[in-house]
Image (spheres, helix red, strand yellow):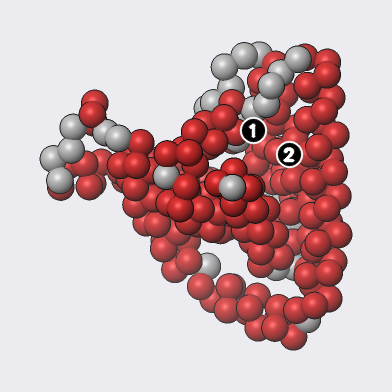
Amino acid sequence: MKKNQYVNVQHLIKLIILFCLFYFSKFLQYIPIILFNLDVKRLTDETQILLSLFSSSCLLITLLIIYRKDLIIYFKKLKKHLFKTLDNSLKYYLLGVLGMMLTNIIITVLFRENGADNERLVQSMITSSPYLMLLSAGIIGPIIEELVFRKTFMDAFTSKWLFILTSGLIFGAMHVITTATTLSGYLYLLPYASLGLSFAYMDYKENSVLPSIIMHIIHNSLLVILAIL
């Protein structure tokens, strides 16, 4: 039987399973809700963030266990070529940020949008609990997203551009699909996808998910810190 030159079927099944786990992990929040008999109609913003942090932490631990062997290999490789890897990754990251900025400007000028709904939601949560959001959105979130959107896709798609495009576009879509309130709001898929494409490209070039994890943590943490300040 001829091996598919574009897709690794076994890893594609794994991708689908982990993607579903990522999408439905929010239901893990019901564990502390039931244990502590919380009234879901009277949850404070801080409690909601803590519940989200709980479900994210459970998901992160699961992903780290699943990919522990690969991550150990990646860490050893990163130690040997640390500065070269970071230098290359920074270049790809800056290109992604440039694409993000340009697409944001175009959407703002042509459609008079005032920013992605997802950004406004995150901003309100930062205002409510800044340091919890630094942990959640600045560190835990990026690690989870890179393992789900980059590692699983990189394993599943053996074609370079199929991996980069699917990883970047689906990453962008997941940031707007549940929060966009207008039709033009879905266009913010493009800025997120620009960053996602750069993350995917740097991982492909380095054959490791650590470059995008590092850059994603830096990106999100800086945004949260700037919002706090």
Point out the residue furthest to the bottom here.
80
Q: Residue at x 48, y 56 (%)?
A: 135
Quadrant position of residue 25: top left
Q: Is residue 199 left or right of residue 141?
A: right
- In this picture, is 78 found above or below 108? below
Rendered location of residue 152, percent (x, y):
60, 55
The amino acid beneath tag 1 is Ala
Quadrant position of residue 80: bottom right
Evaluate whether residue 17 shows in this view. Answer: no
Q: Residue at x 59, y 51 (%)?
A: 225
Point out the residue furthest to the front here.
229
Tag of residue 97: none
- In this picture, is 16 found above or below 215? above
Q: Is residue 55 left or right of residue 220?
A: left
Taking depth in this image into account, of 226 and 26 the one nearest to the observer is: 226
Instruction: State the residue position of label 1.
Output: 173
Instruction: State the residue position of label 2.
Output: 193
Q: Secondary structure at mark 2?
A: helix
- In this picture, is 215 found above or below 97? below
The amino acid beneath tag 2 is Ala
Taking depth in this image into account, of 98 and 169 the one nearest to the observer is: 98
3D distance between C-alphas at marks 1 and 2: 8 Å
The answer to whether the residues at label 1 and label 2 have Cβ atoms under 8 Å apart is yes
Rendered location of residue 100, percent (x, y):
79, 39
